[in-house]
Image (spheres, coloured by chain):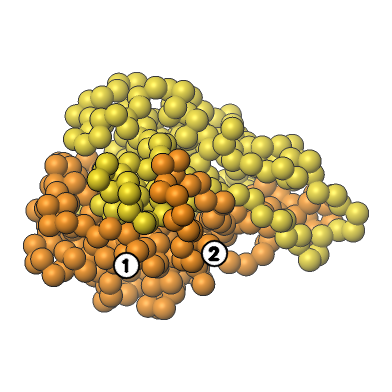
Chain colours: A yellow, B orange
Amino acid sequence: MKAKTSLTQPSRYPKRMDYSEETINAILDEGLFCHVSFTNDGQPFLLPTGYARIGKILYLHGSVGSHFFMQMAKGIPVCVAVTLLDALVLARSVFNHSVNYRSVIGFGKTRLVENEEEKWLAAKSFTEHMIPGRWDDARQPTASEMKKTMFIAVELEEMSAKLRTHGVGDDPEDLDLDVWAGLLPLPVKAQPLQVAEDLKAGVPVPEYLQNYWRGK
Amino acid sequence: MKAKTSLTQPSRYPKRMDYSEETINAILDEGLFCHVSFTNDGQPFLLPTGYARIGKILYLHGSVGSHFFMQMAKGIPVCVAVTLLDALVLARSVFNHSVNYRSVIGFGKTRLVENEEEKWLAAKSFTEHMIPGRWDDARQPTASEMKKTMFIAVELEEMSAKLRTHGVGDDPEDLDLDVWAGLLPLPVKAQPLQVAEDLKAGVPVPEYLQNYWRGK
């Protein structure tokens, strides 16, 4: 994987950039959905969708009838973003307000997954990415369900992470103002489960859902 | 604003589409950041960034030195997405797993904001979109700070919302399986404030931060 090319070199805040695989993978593994950007006749399009990562491949899936997926099945250049918002940063001055975030931008090309083994690997990884432990517990797909699903591999050739993780950065002359300053954390946090009304009596909440948590 | 053109017509799940201004605006006003997609020499690019909405215009802002913003200053077609994840939907079968979400996709063209009055309106709206009540409390920008900031208006010509808000949709033959089913809500929820270490003694937490909440 190339790093710091003309695609991923920033014009601003170079200190916020991180090209390490460890940082990039941690963000990709914590995120629940990505945005995929592609171009058709010069018109940019966006698709918000789930994903799973295996090595430097992101797997997407959709219905075989989706026109976005049919586009991607042709093998097209895409840009993919995963963005995690951590906190609003409230400075004394409006100008120094900011946001703590961790994001990955990746550039690559799509490929239709045709190999059966790779399809199953993508399906399992997708489920396990969203809810670790779910694949072995839920009823697994039938061959006919798999036929209705299209899997797309995005082979990421270039990736970069961008992070802001520090505190308030006010100008020295503003520090004495009577304005509250600090962080307002806004993480994704699981709320109490809502059980399906028609759940079979006696089915317990599985352990992997009891302390569901994204990130480390 | 046109609705249901070839850009916004879905190939799948037409029931999930909503073209009403009320639904679209509610999602745009709840979101904290958007993804902007644009094309340069056939290569798609993505920029995650904050925004504010006034009518059918989304305002973005960045440094005058940012190459993404310099691109947008030229007036280019963009696609913008705001995506809110509400819950993971756990069905008995892997195939029927889903996600509850609300998203807006908008198509439009960028315009550099040059009028001083519109710039100030955008700056205020941006701050108030993130933290209602903050603009009048914090130290407002100086003329020199405003000169360092570029404001871009995205004039949205076509928009559509897509929502999944219902419960588990399992096949009838799976209902009797011993698999837990239901929703795992994952909303954005403010966590306790982290005060800046160097905050002037005696500055209280403002009321607008005490019950910070996105959405209705």
Judge from the rendering whether residue B136 lies leftward or rightward of residue B63; answer left or right. right
What is the total number of numbered labels drawn onto the structure image?
Answer: 2
Q: Alpha-carbon neighbours of circle 2 within 10 Å: few (<14), some, or many (≥20)?
A: few
Labelled disc at residue B136: 1
Tag 2, which secondary structure? Answer: loop
Q: Nearer the viewer, residue A109 or B27?
A: B27
Residue type, numbered disc 1: Asp
**Rendering coords of residue A98 (x, y %):** 34, 48
Judge from the rendering whether residue B210 lies leftward or rightward of residue B156; answer left or right. right
Residue type, numbered disc 2: Asn
**Rendering coords of residue A112 (x, y %):** 43, 38
* Spatial CA span between label 1 and label 2: 18 Å
On the same chain, marks 1 and 2? The answer is yes
Q: Nearer the viewer, residue B138 or B8?
A: B138
Tag 1, which chain? B
Tag 2, which chain? B
| Residue at 68% across, 61% down | B168
Marks 1 and 2 close (CB-CB < 8 Å)? no
**Rendering coords of residue B173 (x, y %):** 79, 58
Q: Quadrant of the C terminus of chain A?
A: top right
Tag 1, which secondary structure? Answer: loop
Which image quadrant is residue A127 in?
Answer: top right
Residue B71 versus residue A53 in the image, above or below: below
Q: Nearer the viewer, residue A36 or A24?
A: A24
| Residue at 36% across, 56% down | A178
The residue under label 2 is B211
| Residue at 48% across, 58% down | B204
Res. B10 in view:
no
Which image quadrant is residue A3 in?
Answer: top left
Residue lying at the far right in this picture: please name it.
Answer: A202
